[in-house]
Image: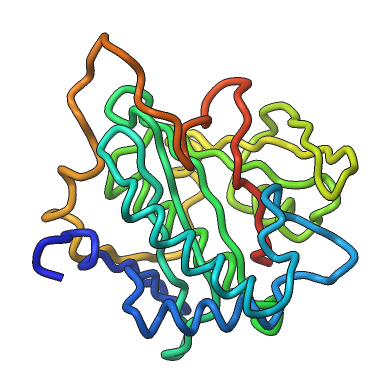
Amino acid sequence: MQHWPLSGITVRTPLVELRWPTPQDLDALAALGAEGVHTPGFMPFFSQWTDGDPATVARRVLQRHWNAMAQWSPDDWTLYLVVVHDGEVVGSQSLGARDFAVTREVLLTSWLGLRHQGMGLGGHARAAVLELAFAGLGAQDAFSVVRRENTASQAVCRKFGFSHDGTQINAVRGARAVSDRYRLRRADWEAARAVPAEIDGLEPALGMFTAEATTGTPAATGLSAALSGVRHAPEPDHIDA
């Protein structure tokens, strides 16, 4: 896409590629989400976007990506990339930030289709997005929020050197849901960096990720507008083991 520099971004590891989704990629991702992302008895996502019939779930996947693209601004953004393995779309990986020029902090979210879990793909997708955040964008911190019962994603956070950074309480399916907040600082990422990753196509898009710092009215609340401190992250959970 000539006038949308984000469309040229790719990050590759030996197992996966993260890339801006083509329309065909989005169709494949929507179908994958409709097939199933988690067992029916456990809801890992605060937004509960996987509840509903397959057609509804598929449309939500598309709308989430389109909404993030339409609402993009340098001071409030969420970058959704598809995870591709052996030419097949297997999931979604995102990073988002508010006032990134000042905070240098990103929120990570991700999911893999149920049939692609347990193959190590989620770990490589995490390594790729951390490479993009720290080496590509110059982030100083990355954080994730993971349901207490989501043991696979809890293990991924620990594997990559995230440290516990508090808890968060949400209402999910009408019940109290306890989640752990995990934070990875740049120095800890550098010390634990193990999976090689290569970034392409980022330089033309760099201006879309930062805005000059101001002392005026804060950015409008959006998908990634509640990221730091004790504020709640609205879409933080992961299914990526």
Q: Position of residue 76 (x, y in %)?
A: 35, 36
In the image, 167 versus 66, the foreground residue is 66
Q: Quadrant of residue 60?
A: bottom right
Can the viewer see residue 118? no
Would you say 238 lies left or right of 107 here?
right
Q: Is 2 rendered above or below residue 226?
A: below
Q: Position of residue 236 (x, y in %)?
A: 62, 46
Q: Position of residue 129 (x, y in %)?
A: 43, 56
In the image, 96 versus 70, the foreground residue is 70
Would you say 119 lies left or right of 4 here?
right
Quadrant of the drawing holding the N terminus: bottom left
Quadrant of the drawing holding the C terminus: bottom right
Instruction: Tell me which residue sits at (25%, 64%) in the image.
Output: 9
Q: Is 230 rendered above or below residue 73?
A: above
Instruction: Tell me which residue sits at (58%, 65%) in the image.
Output: 123
Instruction: Tell me which residue sits at (49%, 84%) in the image.
Output: 28
